[in-house]
Image (cartoon, helix red, strand yellow):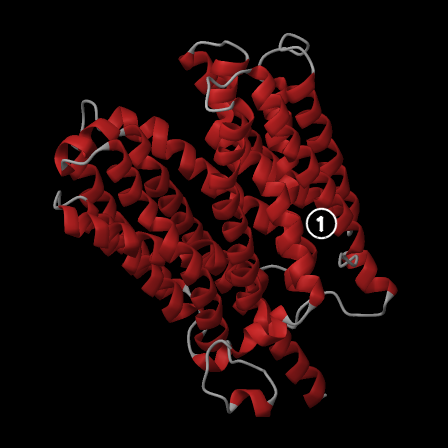
Amino acid sequence: MSAKITATVTTRQGSTMRRLFAVAWLFCLIFYFLQYAVRSAPSVMMDELTSAFGLTTVGLGSLLGLYYYTYSTCSLVSGALLDRWGGKYSIPAGTMILALGIALFGAGVNWMASAGRLLQGAGAAFAFVGAVYLASRGFPKKYLATAIGVTQCVGMLGGAMGQSTVAWLIHGILTWRSFWLDTGIVTALVAVGIFFVTPGGREQTANKLPESEQRRSSIFVPYRIVLTNPQSWLCGLCSGMLFLPTTVGSMTWGVSFLTHGWGLDYHQAVQRASVVPLGWVFGCPVLGYVADRLGRRKPVLLSGIAVMALSIAAIVFLPPLTFPPYVLGFTLGFASGAAMIPYTIIKEVNPDEVKGSATGAINFIVFVMSAIASPLFGHLLQALSGGKTLNELVFSQAFSIGLLCVALAGAMAFLLPETGTRASEKSGRAVR
């Protein structure tokens, strides 16, 4: 009888802890929303920033690009800290670093803006990794892909509002400096909220690595487990390849393709290019939900890859008027939501005690691939055009690389194991 009572109490405690982590995840979604908003906000105030800092366009681009240096490196740091110390202190610390960086950027002084942009990237690296870390503890395994999809959906909404809403705010309601200072204050308040709602204490999120590993002081020990697992690399490379057609192709060169290639006017090109991230907003949670509903990851991942390939082929090779406006862009964005499924798989092919590091590792791989591919794609366009004006033929030849990326992602997806709940049931493992 006592054993039964103990089991009941333990079950209730586990359910309560899950609810607490789920609430903390909701607060972390606000953090993720804000970091995406401040990442994209400078794009709608370029004239104001150029004037305030006295920089050329190239100089301003370099200033804003500082964000990504610290974002990439701190993606690894954030995962390691979460696995070592848990979320109660690590995530609020990252949020507060972001808040400080936002406020410094709004001061209007060059060196403070540079420091602020670096701090923004460092703090922002804790947002997605932290949200996935909390989701993996707040939701059963059968809902994890849905939670990760919703997380990315909220981030993309933040990115969209960082352009549309901020543009409206700074042209009539706030000055650009007031926007940054006020947003810094709001972010600091979110940090306080995350601290109070996140279950605390190292005893509740203790690292369960083998004793021989725990005795070693480095917080990066979990990465040895993650990065020596070949499946981790397949997840990272697969997701990275699926990101490239949207991050480098659509979101960077999409407007140029539509104006110089298809001859659309600037405003129409911006509207049509913007439906790609809008498709992401819907595709991430929907595809995540379908993967959870089926209890299988690979069929949804491979279906998304197939639709992406067809969409890219239609955009690049078919005449512009073959499909109604916005259809292909939205379809590409929606199917690209499949790029988030490897984020679920990498957590399921690695031990529970390295979940944070697994997310940090895949985030780092994906970002580095995009960072390397972006300038290479620019050089490719220049080489194909011979230094002359870009046209539809040049873009068609260059964008064909996107099909190769998607094909490689498909090959890697076939090599990944099935980690959904159906696979767990067949192998006799308990579904958490």
User: Label 1: which residue?
Assistant: 292
Left-right relation of 412 to 214:
right
The quadrant where residue 55 appears: top left
The quadrant where residue 317 appears: top right
Q: Where is residue 93 in the image (x, y as percent from the top left)?
A: 32, 65
Tell me the residue at 71%/83% (across/down): 4
Tell me the residue at 32%/42% (across/down): 38
Q: Position of residue 6 (x, y in %)?
A: 64, 84
423 and 159: which is toward the camera? 159
Tell me the residue at 79%/44% (across/down): 299
Left-right relation of 245 to 42:
right
Left-right relation of 101 to 249:
left
Q: Is residue 360 above or below residue 112?
A: below
Q: Please, what is the three-letter code of the amino acid marked with disc 1?
A: Asp
Mark 1 closeness class: few <14, some 14–19, many ≥20 residues within 10 Å: many
Q: Is residue 297 visible?
A: no
Tell me the residue at 61%/78% (across/down): 9
Q: Is residue 266 above or below residue 343?
A: above
Left-right relation of 194 to 11:
left
Question: In the picture, which quadrant includes the C terminus?
Answer: bottom right
Question: In the picture, which quadrant includes the N terminus?
Answer: bottom right
175 and 232: which is toward the camera? 232
Q: Where is residue 66 in the image (x, y as percent from the top left)?
A: 32, 50
SS at circle 1: helix
102 and 385: which is toward the camera? 385
Q: Can residue 215 be seen in this view?
A: yes
